[in-house]
Image (cartoon, rainbow, N blue to C red):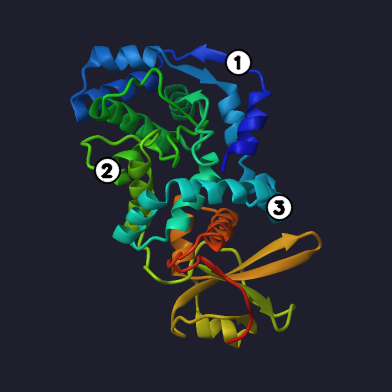
């Protein structure tokens, strides 16, 4: 989800500077984590003293693809023919592990694969920033979200201690997301799972771990096995008033949408919660209805375009797989 921005950021001057441990907010952070987490002060100071703050990270944060692209351009990147082709190859190569994760969670194997495809091109592009630099920059030099990123920096220190990896060399996105599924440190500690039972969790290289972790993230977010995520829709009256769209909330029941003139196909009960999605395609709007599982996908990335891209990519991957039994994430058609 960050590839276009990462490419842009790579063209910007780095303007890196060492993190100043004498800054009051940095000193306060050190005091807090030493006391709260029982970390060794010298170790924390050594790690933070090696961090560099970079203006390119802030520039990339200010231009996420979900905010600067309209749906057609966004879709061309994440649901391209090449990404679909690569996804089908990826599914075939990892079918057994994907379907094991799907069977244990109820999350379709093709959706698990699609998430990896959207996030990191199936593990090929997992980020070139040091996670430490990204989190330190955003924790102390990104006004408005410093509390969140200080929390993630603390989680990263704890994670590196627990998982036994070097916090000075771990690479990720400009936001500090890690591995093939791009988990933030708190998500890594909370949702990552040992998919192959080898006693350790590796979200960079161990595919059973990666698949099990993505599946568990969705299950923990409330995934309903066997239900669709989103369907194409149309409006009986394009000028229907008072019909807000693209809010990340299940603000309507299905029958309420139908009474307002939204045409779509669904096998779910009439009182199932849903949302209307409207995105511009050139000069014309396009419409979808998202159900509970669509909302769950937006917990991974709070964007309707992201959830649509993942759903479409999953359906395209599944279309080429023999004997795929998981329910597709998307469906076409209007009317019931």
Which residue lies under the disc numbered 1? Answer: 15
Upstream in the sequence, badge 3 or badge 2? 3
Residue 53 drawn above or below residue 81: above
| Quarter occupied by residue 280 | bottom right
Upstream in the sequence, badge 2 or badge 1? 1
Please state the horizontal and vertical placement of residue 63, each as a whole percent of the image: 64, 38
Which residue lies under the disc numbered 3? Answer: 70
Element under disc 3: loop
**Distance between mark 1 and mark 3 Cα atoms:** 30 Å
**Distance between mark 2 and mark 1 Cα atoms:** 42 Å
Mark 3 and mark 1 in contact (Cβ < 8 Å)? no
Mark 1 and mark 2 in contact (Cβ < 8 Å)? no
Mark 2 and mark 3 in contact (Cβ < 8 Å)? no
Please state the horizontal and vertical placement of residue 208, each as a whole percent of the image: 34, 44
Residue drawn where x is 40% and y is 12% of the image: 50
Q: Residue 196: which disc?
A: 2
Question: Would you say 299 lies left or right of 58 here?
Answer: left
Labels 2, 1: front one: 2
Residue drawn where x is 61% and y is 73% of the image: 332
Q: Residues within 10 Å of mark 1 (few under 14, many from 20)?
A: few
Residue 9 drawn above or below residue 73: above
**Distance between mark 3 and mark 2 Cα atoms:** 40 Å
| Quarter occupied by residue 313 | bottom right
């Amino acid at each position: 989800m960050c590839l276009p921005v990462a490419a842009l950021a790579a063209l910007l001057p780095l303007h890196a500077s060492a993190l100043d441990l004498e800054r009051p907010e940095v000193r306060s952070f050190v005091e807090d984590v030493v006391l709260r987490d029982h970390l060794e002060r010298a170790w924390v100071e050594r790690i933070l003293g090696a961090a560099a703050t970079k203006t390119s990270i802030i520039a990339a944060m200010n231009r996420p693809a979900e905010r600067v692209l309209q749906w057609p351009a966004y879709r061309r990147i994440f649901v391209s023919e090449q990404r679909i082709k690569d996804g089908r190859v990826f599914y075939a190569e990892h079918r057994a592990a994907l379907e094991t994760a799907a069977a244990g969670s109820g999350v379709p194997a093709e959706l698990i694969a699609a998430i990896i495809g959207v996030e990191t091109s199936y593990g090929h592009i997992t980020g070139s920033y040091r996670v430490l630099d990204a989190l330190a920059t955003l924790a102390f030099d990104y006004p408005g979200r410093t509390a969140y990123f200080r929390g993630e920096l603390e989680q990263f220190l704890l994670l590196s201690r627990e998982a036994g990896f070097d916090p000075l060399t771990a690479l990720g996105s400009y936001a500090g997301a890690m591995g093939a599924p791009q988990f933030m440190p708190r998500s890594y500690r909370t949702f990552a799972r040992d998919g192959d039972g080898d006693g350790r969790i590796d979200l960079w290289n161990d595919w059973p771990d990666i698949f099990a972790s993505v599946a568990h993230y969705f299950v923990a977010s409330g995934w309903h096995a066997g239900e669709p995520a989103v369907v194409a829709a149309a409006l009986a009256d394009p000028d229907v008033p008072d019909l807000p769209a693209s809010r990340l909330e299940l603000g309507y029941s299905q029958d309420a949408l139908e009474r307002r003139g939204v045409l779509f196909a669904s096998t779910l009960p009439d009182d199932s919660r849903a949302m209307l999605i409207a995105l511009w395609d050139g000069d014309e709007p396009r419409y979808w209805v998202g159900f509970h599982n669509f909302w769950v996908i937006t917990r991974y990335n709070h964007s309707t375009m992201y959830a649509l891209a993942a759903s479409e990519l999953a359906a395209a991957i599944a279309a080429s797989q023999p004997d795929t039994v998981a329910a597709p994430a998307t469906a076409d058609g209007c009317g019931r």
